[in-house]
Image (cartoon, grey):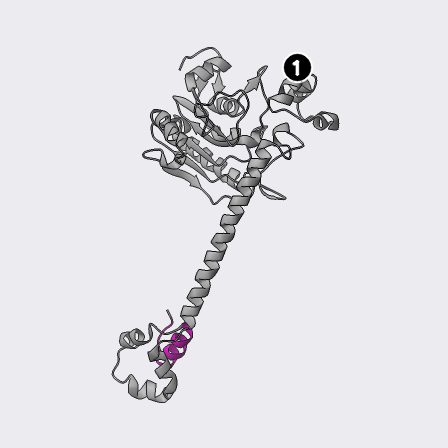
Amino acid sequence: MDMGKNCNSYRALIRDFICSPYFKDKPIYGKPMEYWSSGNIYSESEKALSQDKEWQRYTTQINNSPSNLRRLFISKEYLVLQHYVQVPNVKYTSQKALLWCVKTEDYCRSRGYTNFQANTDSILLCLDDRWKQANIEEVYVDELFLTQQQQQQQQANKRVVQQLMSYSDAGGKVFPRFKAVYYVPQLGTQLLEAIKKMDKGELPYKAFVGMKVIQKQTPQWGRFSLRPSDYIFDRKGGKLDQYAQQIIEVEKAKLQEAKKIALQQKFTEQEKEQEKGKLEEIFETLDEKFIKEILFEGFSTEQKAEVIQEFTAQGKKKYGSLLELKEG
């Protein structure tokens, strides 16, 4: 990578990349007119945007949103992002999978990033910088994730991943769909072939060799975070909203089916548990004194336990106590 005069962190580079594409050097996160009239302008850069009529006109027609980022792939050779729905004017590397891939060196040059310094804070902090990429599901990284100061970097990364997974608001987690960070050795050399596989419908985590899970959690399926008051792209009835509703509907149906199957299994197990075998039914007809003093005379503890092991839970408790067997 070309080393120039400016010092930048990888975190700044990734933050810049995930907000692509740009117009007039600004992300095309178009705002509804009500946003500007509400007075909720939080930064100097937003104040400048509120006065930039050219940017506003452009992003009214061609726009994107932080809510649209699905997956992120970070390697020394390539940077790849995946959107949920198509953003106008983006020349995707895979139109079908909506994957946009650029050479890391080319992207750095085009955006003026040079002379990188290894930073010990986590590059994943960019997901929670300024614009929250709230619906991101997975992040794939290579050795770039583990910089020269590996131990400090790994600890920082783990802390951030845990934070991303635990952030919550009144409605639940701020990153409700976030499920894993994967480490892929030599990710850059695998990415182009993996993109071809994903273009054919293969899931990303099946497209790589030697992949390891750095951190994993169960996401809040059936939830998708949109901010229609902040972004035109998130508006009700828009492409992203329609896609989100489809995802939510499918995921909720799957959750209901999973619950149904779990309840059926539980009911079947309970039925089986309550179903007495023939031997237990015979025992029910016998005198308890006869069972204890005559039927099991000469039996060892292990032999007694073996006889009643197929009994129902109630039967095991009753006859285990009668035969002075320890529970468990």
- The residue that label 1 is drawn on is 54
Q: Residue 208: image x %, image y %?
A: 35, 33
Q: Quadrant of residue 62?
A: top right
- Is any atom of residue 221 visible in this view? no
Q: Residue 214: image x %, image y %?
A: 40, 38
Q: Residue 162: image x %, image y %?
A: 49, 40
Q: Please indicate whether residue 58 sits to the left or right of residue 246 in the image.
A: right
Q: Magenta span covers which residues? A: 313-327
Residue type at mark 1 is: Glu
The residue at the far left in this view is 298
The residue at 62%/44% (across/down) is 171
- Is any atom of residue 315 visible in this view? yes
Q: How many marks?
A: 1
The residue at 54%/36% (across/down) is 135
Q: Residue 120: image x %, image y %?
A: 45, 28
Q: Foreground residue, 298 or 139?
A: 139
Q: Foreground residue, 288 or 26?
A: 26
The residue at the far top in this view is 5
- SS class, disc 1: helix
Q: Is residue 44 on the magenta stretch?
A: no
Question: What secondary structure prevails in the magenta region?
Answer: helix
Question: Height in image: 291 above or below 276?
Answer: below
